[in-house]
Amino acid sequence: MKTVVPFVKRPVVDRLAFILRWACGRHDDQEAMLKPVRRRIAKAIEAGTCERAYPKGARYRENFRIVLDGGSHAYVQVGALIPERQKGGIRVVINPAKFCDGDAAQINRVMRRIIGREYDKLMQRPLINCIDFAVDIQHASLSRMLVSYSNAQRMTVMAKRMAQHCHIEGYNFGSVSSDYFVVAYDKSAERIHAAILNMVKQINGKRGIQKNELLTANAIKQMKPKLDGIEVVRVEVRGKKLRGLPLYKLNSLPNRFARFKFADLNATGAALPRLTERAFLAMCRQDGLKAALEAFKHTKQARKVNAYWRGHQASWWKPEPMWQQACDAVREIGLFPDSAFEPWDE
């Protein structure tokens, strides 16, 4: 059977949290500014355009979701609890990867009605707190790859042992306290897990209908296309603490996709004796590539192991343009005006 060469898709914006500098000036009366906004939020909730949210430990006075026509939502917070310490009185969290046509325009329409005429001006100076960029590698399996990420002090491997085989589900690079957290994981497993949960919800949610074999069979039938889908590895760069970065500075940040290196074990490359190969791969999956190469450093197999790693370098992984493509994807959301991407006086 012919091996399909992996295909790397363009980056997408998987999550974006930004703030707007509303009611945070020295002479701004936030309570007075909030009164009409609260009335408009209540009207939007009554009309079904928005719904109330009750987040734990919220740092804002008003919390709600805009219900988007495409099926997702935008989470909005208004009125900073500590305006002198928070950079903006409006916080918005979205997942553009789930947007449908018209969702960005709908957010702007609803926010314009709630905040007022000032909203368009505020959107010219958004400050980014968090952003996740994601790249999907189609026809790829982490179990047939070696993954390296430079500058990471910590690495975690998620794997499942099945019979004699080890199935790699993901790699985490960085710590929970890091400004950035990068991951490579099996998107197919996530898709299957979501499909199973959806199947269970369908079965349990059928009121007045007995949970019989026919109902279960129908749910499995709907799930089967997801189970039969192509293998996908997702690579994510999660900027968790950008601390109010002006949007126009986003493309000047380091390209963290370029820190990834992949070895494609399905590709033709230098070979190792079977026992050495198994030992090397086991070390890579247990302790990471860097530790495995170090372990072989002063052995007779050191040269062959390094040639094996270098000889299987993935030719399909070309990260150089990815950061700019990711920044372009922010513009393509259609949420921000063009002026938001131009330098301004801070």
Image (cartoon, grey):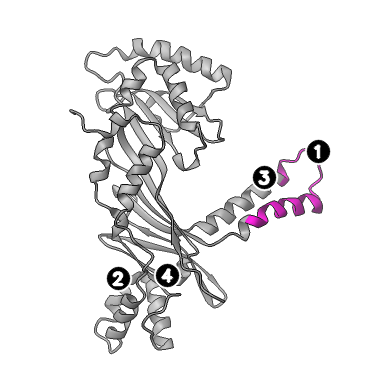
**Which of marks 1 and 2 precedes in the sequence?**
1
Q: Mark 3 is on which residue type?
A: Lys
Q: Is residue 162 left or right of residue 145?
A: right
Q: Which residue is mark 4?
A: 145
Pointer 2: residues within 10 angstroms few (<14), some, or many (20+)?
some
In the rendering, which numbered label is found on residue 290? 2
Pointer 4: residues within 10 angstroms few (<14), some, or many (20+)?
many
Q: Which residue is mark 1?
A: 208
Between 62 and 138, the one lying in front of the other is: 138
Pointer 3: residues within 10 angstroms few (<14), some, or many (20+)?
few
- Residue 117, above or below 254: above
The reply to whether dot 2 and dot 3 touch (C-beta < 8 Å) is no
Q: Which residue is mark 3?
A: 201
Residue range corresponding to the magenta coloring: 203-225
- Residue 279, above or below 27: below
CA–CA distance between discs 2 and 4?
A: 14 Å
Q: Mark 4 is on which residue type?
A: Met
Q: Mark 1 is on which residue type?
A: Gly
